[in-house]
Amino acid sequence: MKSVASSHALPFALAIGMAGLITAGAALAAPSVQQPAPDFTAVDSNGRSHSLSDFRGQTVILEWTNHDCPYVRKHYETGNMQALQKDSAKDGVVWLSVISSAPGTQGYVKGDEANRLTETRDAAPSAVLLDPEGKVGTLYAARTTPHMYIVDPEGTLVYMGGIDDKPTSRRSSVKDAKNYVRQALAEMKAGQPISEASTRPYGCSVKYAY
Amino acid sequence: MILKRTEMGRLVNALAACAIFFFATMSFGAAQDLPGLVQDMLSPQQAPTDSAPVPSVPPLSLPNAERKVDASLVSEVSGLPVGGEVWVGLRQKIPPGWHTYWRNPGDSGEPTHIEWQLPDGFSAGEIQWPAPHRLPYGPLVNFGYKDEVLLLTRIKAPADLPVGEPVTLRGHARWLVCEEICIPEDQEVALTLVATSDSPGADPAWAELFENTRRALPQPAPWPTTVATGSDGLRLSIDASLPADRVSDVAFFPYEDGWIDNAAEQEARIGAEALTVDLQPGYRPLEGILEGIIVIEEALETGTARQAFRVVAEPVLAPAGLAGPDITVLNAFLFALMGGLILNLMPCVFPVLSMKALALAAKAHGERQHAAIGGAVFTLGVLVSFAAIAGSLIALQAGGTQVGWGFQLQSPVFVTLLAYLLFAVGLSLSGVFAVGSSLMGIGGNLSAVSGHRGAFLTGVLAAIVATPCTAPFMGAAIGFALTQPAAVSMGVFLALSLGMALPYLLLSLFPSLLRFLPRPGAWMERLKQALAFPMYASAIWLVWVLSQQTGPQGVLVALAGILLIAFAAWLHGATREGARGWRVTGAVGASAAVILALVLVRLPAPAPSPASPVATASLPSDGLAYEPYSADRLAQLRRENRAVFVNFTAAWCVTCLVNDRVALATQEVADAFARWDVAYLKGDWTNRDPEITAALREFGRSGVPLYVFYPPADSGRDPIVLPQILTEAAVVSTLDSLNRDIIGG
């Protein structure tokens, strides 16, 4: 956590090491919008392997999810997330749902259960990526479910943050919410710059292994 | 502190930035060229038309027994003052392992929310959030509360309430409670109070919880705070002088998400004059002020005190490297070495050293051996001088004195003498009196005259004239050095001095380098004369410093002394070539003038400098009239049979400041003091004070805060020591109960 460097608190060895690297390793290093989106390869719920770079030329949405998280449930049980998935699919947007829950934690599922969830919830992702080791999550510094990212056809990260501006688990909040992802997609389609490209993600913590 | 950071400090920081650049690593995960298999999945899946039923939505409000958090609405006082206000709190009892959230929940989560449903005419304020804790979860960090928290809200009551009638305050509270999983919970809470016309008394059931919660509320920080944005982080600088050995932990909590990386380690450094906290940037750039709270944990003799301060950090421009978190020991040595090199170009040092180099150039074809030894001895002189200064500084610090680098410049005597010296060097360069003669043999070809002793003394001279330039110039490295173990501090200073001596050392070790110096000639004399002006400028600056320390009188003394130095130099120079009698007269007259100048320094005892670094940390007024503590005054008040409250405090003691604000600045306390005619003495231990040290020892303490209440002497009762974490209730009840006893008995 915090280290207080005082006359007798700073170990010599630490000082000789490179403090910058040590601190960088301790936390998630967040990617930045307008920078190349970090590439990754992950296996989906049907055992197929995907790399982000495979989708060059298409807009890609990454959605961190955990089906038991109350905030995720708000968006699925109101049909909000499914509507966004279907609407964006109409524009040829690739939707990758990512599950970074570690085995034994909330939201962890195997492929067949992920498929069953997609079916029963009438969800429409292009693929559900299984990331039980949290590699993709760590790469994107995904911290909440949901946590949304948009990568443009050139492979640039153009949006990261919350799904909307109502950081609550109350279902009634959905109808009055400003959906940042929807807004960003509309602006991209219109050739406009994304007005809110980096917002506060809200929800449950991603259940990383630790 | 007298010396302000200057542009030159910025220059050094810029240099530091260059070095840090090499260490900085930015990786975005190298693109992996793995075969992309999939094309078929790109066509969006067709949604089944007969969609499966959406799982039923569970009721939002759970029955009490199923909630993780046991919440209730409690009041600080037992009645509702008509037309007044009352503090109520949502009390959350949180099961072990679970937590609820602060106003900014951190990486995930949601703050508690209360929707008030109050009777007409009532109004509720915002929740007052006590200082949260950092709650790590894997690579994430949240900000929140464990075990129990009281979220205070101020409720205002209308003036037209019927007295004696019960009033029910209702609210709908919602919160998220998480362990590994998160559960949103909500609950209807209510509290019934009876309207009263007078001010109701504290509800004893909750008094302690309210007191403790009040202490955990952030206070406005009494220190100016800035934030500098660098390429690799934010540096929060708080102009607080804190005792490094007492502060056990420091954490910053931002009010808004995204400015900082919540989970990243926060590196706090406690320097002599400022607390800095290095923060990793978040996902959105900081534009404007950085607002949040800083939580400082202080180790007291009776436990740990956790104090929160609200800070509004103004952005300051900073070179990229300033916010770099990593001045490591090696870096510090490196920067110190570079800084020392650059010092050679400083107005106060350059003339002295260039004279040395010119002298060397003049005898470029002399004995190599001699030159090499001379260079080594000169280097030794520089090293020894710096070691002596650094050694005394470290020793003073170890002895508990609050000193910073440049502490010697806090002495007006030292500053005056230094001004004399620089002025004299300037005169010598101007040719008013010949160099290489008596008067300590200032400047140029001293080495030629008196050999190794001269080289050594030139090294000492160079170090002495360098110190005023070092303080503002080497701020970063020296600030770092002083927070390090003595060996590291010394290493930094030695690296600095080695850097300073390096050019000359190299020239003397490798005389072939002298080929690159221009041929000696008349230009050397002109250059020498020109170099006098930086020396005069340095002297002027020192006199200005003096004016800050002592006012007009010190300036008068220094200028008169400078006049005497000038007279002595002229007399010496003028009589030097004359007959023996003249020479003797000149030498005696010049010596007399110099001695007079030196005596002058001591004549009007200069007013003590008010600008010591510790004094600048303001001690917030606690609103009570007090007299400064002295053992005599205490004894006198005791003889007068007065009750006395003594507050031993210090500007650098965080707990003291908070106690002053929270527990002593209140109307209740002022009333109690007035009620029992208590005399209030304050012992300020900001600067060392043997009298206070002795008083502390009398109560078995070695530090502040210490609060002692002396009942009137006639009562025959012993003094009472109050808790180090002071509360208003503790003060008032101590005064009341004791005095009541005495008067009642």
Image: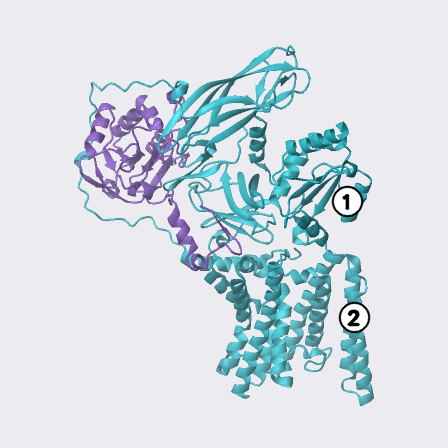
Chain colours: A purple, B cyan
Res. B67 in view? yes
Nearest the eye: B265 or B341: B265
The quadrant of the rendering that contains the C terminus of chain B is: top right
Instruction: Pinpoint the chain carrying mark 1.
Output: B
Residue drawn at the location 42% of the way across and 42% of the way down:
B263
Residue A18 coordinates in the image, percent (x, y): 41, 57
Disc 2 element: helix
Give left or right: position of A175 versus B592.
left
Give left or right: position of A123 versus B653.
left
The quadrant of the rendering that contains the N terminus of chain B is: bottom right
Mark on residue B634?
1
Specify the quadrant of the image occupied by residue B444. bottom right
Q: Which residue is mark 2?
A: B597
**In the image, residue B152 above or below residue B311:** above
| Residue type at numbered disc 1 | Leu
Residue drawn at the location 57% of the way across and 79% of the way down:
B377
Which mark is nearer the camera, 1 or 2? 1
Nearest the eye: B98 or B385: B98
Disc 1 element: helix
Specify the quadrant of the image occupied by residue A14. bottom left
Discs 1, 2: same chain: yes
Q: Residues within 10 Å of mark 1 (few under 14, many from 20)?
A: many
Res. B445 in view? no
Residue A198 coordinates in the image, percent (x, y): 40, 37
Indicate which disc, 1 or 2, sits on the residue closer to the N terminus: 2
Residue B580 coordinates in the image, percent (x, y): 80, 89
Nearest the eye: A136 or B265: B265
Residue drawn at the location 53% of the way across and 82% of the way down:
B372
